[in-house]
């Protein structure tokens, strides 16, 4: 049973800060050695320079009017750190606006408690028809709410949303006593397809275990293959391969709210927790769905168990904006190194102090005296 989460790296502010540090290490004798620290600030500085030179102003709008989670209340850490990369975060009420603003690079709908109105859907569809980008962070809602218009938008991208909350039945895959916080899998990109997840390989290689909490599931709509649409999965429940070579999962989607759930507690299916899609017929409009809106809020953004979902979202933001410079600006982190010296005797220590401390101090003192005599 998982009582904690193994983390080989911890990014300050959930991957959005300037420093990262590896977990404590030990030498061959089992003694603790200095942790490696990495400076990420050059990425932030380069991002600011790029924004000034290119004149780019990337506006991310959060929709309001449906009791959603809001940036000023729930995502202040994300807002502050995105600002370091010149992504400005604003709010938008489509009920009172004539249209999605022209400067909107990305629109986010975070845990709405009610559906879009027909007029709001029309405005969002028009935005997508012109190549817009929308992120749907659809946390489970236990109310009997039918998201008819949101489902219609997703259906146009061959994605369907279930009214459930995913639970893990295998106790070795979830947090002790909490089947709704569980391990998940990062889906590798298909050969020649859109790559949004390979950059996360460094985290998993370093021992980071992907987790998700309190999430609903999605699935790809079948029938009528539309070659203009590219759709794929980003996060899934952990799967294993059965005797026939099929992927199976011990997670289930428990009915949760809504009025028309897909199925009740069907076991064995691998469930999609996050997906993406793009449509060439709509000027390469892009959407992303995530089964939870809490993963990047102020409570969870700095938690090590949400490092991978947070960085996945950053990858999606870069993809949606078509940025030539990714969120890390392509600059490797700079490692601070720490040297050490082993002294075998008191005599050696005293000699070292004389060479590296006493003599430099004496030279500095003599230099100061000479400077003062010449000045006065």
Image: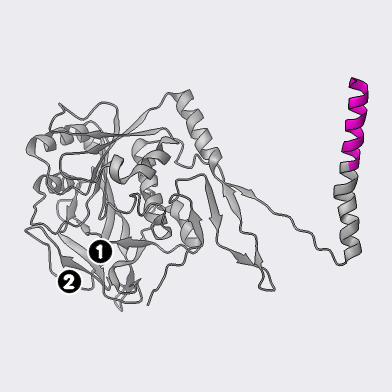
Q: Nearer the viewer, residue 30 or 284?
A: 30
Position of 190 compared to 340: left or right? left
The residue wearing badge 2 is 266
Element marked by disc 1: loop
Q: For the view shown, which residue lies furthest in the top direction?
A: 376
Q: Position of residue 167 (x, y in %)?
A: 24, 69
Residue 14 tag number: none
Q: Nearer the viewer, residue 5 or 347?
A: 347
**Residue 143 on the magenta segment:** no
Residue 29 can be seen, yes or no: yes
Which secondary structure type mostly characterizes the magenta part of the structure? helix
Identify the residue at horizontal 89%, vertical 37% (top origin).
365
Which corner quadrant holds the C terminus?
top right
Label 2 – label 1 distance at C-alpha: 10 Å
**Residue 365 on the magenta segment:** yes
Q: Position of residue 190 (x, y in %)?
A: 36, 54
Residue 271 tag number: 1
Which corner quadrant holds the N terminus?
bottom left
Identify the residue at horizontal 87%, vertical 42% (top origin).
361
Element marked by disc 2: loop
Residues rendered magenta in the picture: 362-376
Q: Nearer the viewer, residue 331 or 145?
A: 145
Q: Position of residue 72 (x, y in %)?
A: 30, 40
Callout 2: 10 Å neighbours few (<14), some, many (20+)? few
Identify the residue at horizontal 41%, vertical 57% (top origin).
303
Position of 301 compared to 94: left or right? right
Callout 1: 10 Å neighbours few (<14), some, many (20+)? many
Q: Is residue 349 above or below residue 171?
A: above
Residue 247 can be seen, yes or no: no
């Amino acid at each position: 049973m998982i009582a904690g989460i193994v983390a080989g790296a911890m990014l300050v502010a959930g991957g959005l800060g300037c420093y990262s540090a590896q977990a404590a290490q030990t030498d061959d004798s089992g003694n603790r050695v200095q942790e490696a620290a990495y400076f990420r600030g050059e990425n932030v500085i380069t991002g600011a320079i790029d924004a000034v030179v290119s004149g780019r102003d990337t506006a991310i709008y959060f929709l309001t009017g449906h009791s959603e989670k809001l940036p000023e209340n729930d995502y202040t850490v994300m807002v502050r750190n995105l600002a370091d990369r010149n992504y400005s975060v604003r709010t938008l009420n489509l009920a009172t606006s004539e249209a999605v603003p022209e400067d909107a690079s990305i629109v986010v709908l975070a845990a709405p408690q009610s559906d879009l109105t027909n007029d709001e859907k029309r405005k969002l569809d028009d935005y997508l028809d012109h190549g817009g980008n929308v992120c749907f962070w659809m946390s489970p809602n236990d109310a009997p709410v039918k998201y008819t218009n949101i489902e219609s938008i997703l259906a146009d991208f061959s994605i369907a949303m279930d009214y459930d909350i995913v639970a893990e039945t295998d106790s070795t895959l979830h947090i002790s006593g909490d089947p709704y916080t569980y391990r998940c899998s990062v889906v590798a990109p298909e050969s020649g397809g859109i790559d949004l997840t390979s950059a996360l390989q460094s985290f998993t290689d370093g021992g980071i275990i992907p987790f998700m909490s309190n999430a609903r599931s999605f699935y790809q709509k079948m029938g009528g293959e539309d070659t203009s649409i590219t759709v794929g999965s980003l996060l899934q429940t952990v799967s294993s391969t059965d005797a026939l070579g099929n992927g199976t999962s011990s997670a289930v989607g428990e009915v949760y709210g809504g009025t028309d759930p897909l199925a009740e507690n069907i076991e064995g299916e691998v469930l999609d927790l996050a997906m993406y899609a793009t449509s060439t017929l709509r000027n390469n409009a892009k959407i992303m769905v995530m089964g939870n809106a809490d993963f990047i809020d102020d409570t969870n953004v700095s938690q090590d168990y949400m490092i991978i979902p947070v960085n996945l979202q950053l990858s999606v933001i870069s993809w949606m904006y078509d940025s030539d410079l990714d969120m890390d600006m392509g600059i490797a982190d700079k490692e601070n190194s720490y040297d050490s010296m082993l002294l075998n005797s008191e005599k050696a220590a005293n000699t070292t102090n004389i060479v590296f401390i006493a003599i430099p101090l004496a030279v500095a003192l003599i230099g100061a005296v000479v400077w003062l005599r010449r000045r006065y």
